[in-house]
Image (tube, rainbow, N blue to C red):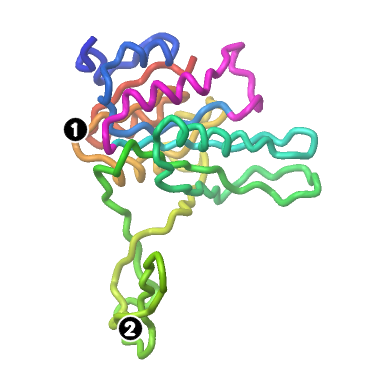
């Protein structure tokens, strides 16, 4: 069935079965967060990761992006590494691992001391189907904007001999933001509606990815919709959306 029948709809059904109804290569951006190992009880529903990943590859447009926000459980003193296994599987089936980003929480939940440091982050794996079509990088102020420097240079990142050339003079006003993005979780007014969900992510996180990887009118998707944050933000930003429920 044509993707037009699903645009701007919340669709009831198993997310894998729903995705199977979509045409090939129709989604511009997916922003989603899968269940983390067995950290929570999702009312008895399972999580067929490989089926989800394969369908995401099929329905993602050439140049489209999947943002996969994930972390690992700690079992018997060891992190599971499931997030890395998932990232490698996405590569196996054809995605590029375009970027390994970090979602750092300014207000992480304190943990009982277990001979390890308090966990403050989650991975945001950014997968692309081929070369990324749209990238509108977020910019931040340069610390030394406008400063005239005598000896600072840019490094030439060639495959072979690496040299430094071209004086950075004066320092630019703006630079591309780094790949560690920091957010407060559950404190902003716009995030209050999602507080009933066990693991919501901030609206601002979704907003920044939509800004980065899409244009007006593009289709944004979340196969595991959770509290509906992805859909809400996509709608507010003038993007089209598709959203099956998380089961």
- The residue that appears at 24% across and 27% down in the rendered structure is 240
Above/below status of 165 relative to 103? below
Q: Viewed as shown, does residue 16 lie left or right of 106?
A: left
Q: Viewed as shown, does residue 38 lie left or right of 159?
A: right
Q: Earlier in the sequence, mark 1 or mark 2?
A: 2
The range drawn in magenta is: 36-63
| Residue situated furthest bottom in the rendering | 150
Residue 44 badge:
none
State whether residue 62 appears in this view: yes
Residue 198 screen position, x and y as percent? 57, 27
Instruction: Name the residue carrying label 1.
Output: 217
Above/below status of 162 relative to 245? below
- The residue that appears at 79% across and 46% down in the rendered structure is 113
Proximity of marks 1 and 2: CB atoms separated by less than 8 Å: no
Above/below status of 224 relative to 118? above
Image quadrant assignment for residue 131: top left
Above/below status of 130 relative to 55? below
Pick the residue in front: 178 or 227.
Answer: 178
Element carrying mark 2: loop
26 inside magenta stretch:
no
Pick the residue in front: 169 or 58.
Answer: 58
Residue 22 screen position, x and y as percent? 29, 15
Pick the residue in front: 207 or 25.
Answer: 25
- The residue that appears at 65% across and 47% down in the rendered structure is 119
Residue 49 screen position, x and y as percent? 52, 23
State whether residue 225 appears in this view: no
| Total numbered badges shown on the rendered structure | 2
How packed mark 1 is, by other alpha carbons closer than 10 Å (few <14, some 14-19, many 20 or more), is some
Q: Viewed as shown, does residue 67 lie left or right of 26?
A: right
Element carrying mark 1: loop
Residue 146 screen position, x and y as percent? 29, 80
Residue 147 badge:
2
């Amino acid at each position: 069935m044509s993707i037009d029948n699903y645009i701007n709809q919340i669709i009831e059904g198993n997310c894998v079965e729903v995705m199977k109804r979509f045409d090939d290569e129709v989604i511009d951006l997916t922003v989603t967060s899968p269940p983390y190992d067995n950290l929570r009880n999702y009312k008895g529903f399972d999580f067929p990761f490989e089926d989800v990943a394969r369908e995401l590859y099929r329905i993602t447009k050439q140049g489209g992006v999947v943002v996969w926000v994930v972390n690992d459980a700690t079992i018997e003193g060891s992190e599971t590494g499931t997030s890395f296994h998932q990232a490698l599987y996405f590569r196996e089936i054809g995605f590029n691992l375009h970027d390994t980003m970090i979602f750092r929480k300014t207000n992480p939940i304190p943990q009982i001391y277990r001979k390890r440091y308090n966990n403050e982050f989650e991975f945001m794996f950014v997968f692309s189907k081929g070369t990324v079509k749209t990238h509108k990088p977020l910019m931040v102020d340069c610390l030394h904007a406008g400063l005239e420097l005598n000896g600072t240079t840019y490094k030439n990142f060639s495959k072979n001999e690496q040299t430094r050339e071209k004086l950075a003079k004066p320092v630019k006003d703006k630079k591309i933001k780094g790949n560690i993005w920091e957010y407060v979780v559950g404190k902003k007014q716009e995030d209050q509606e999602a507080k009933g969900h066990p693991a919501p992510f901030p609206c601002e996180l979704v907003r920044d990815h939509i800004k980065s990887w899409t244009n007006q009118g593009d289709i944004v998707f979340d196969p595991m919709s959770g509290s509906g944050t992805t859909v809400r933000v996509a709608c507010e930003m003038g993007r089209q959306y598709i959203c099956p429920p998380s089961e």
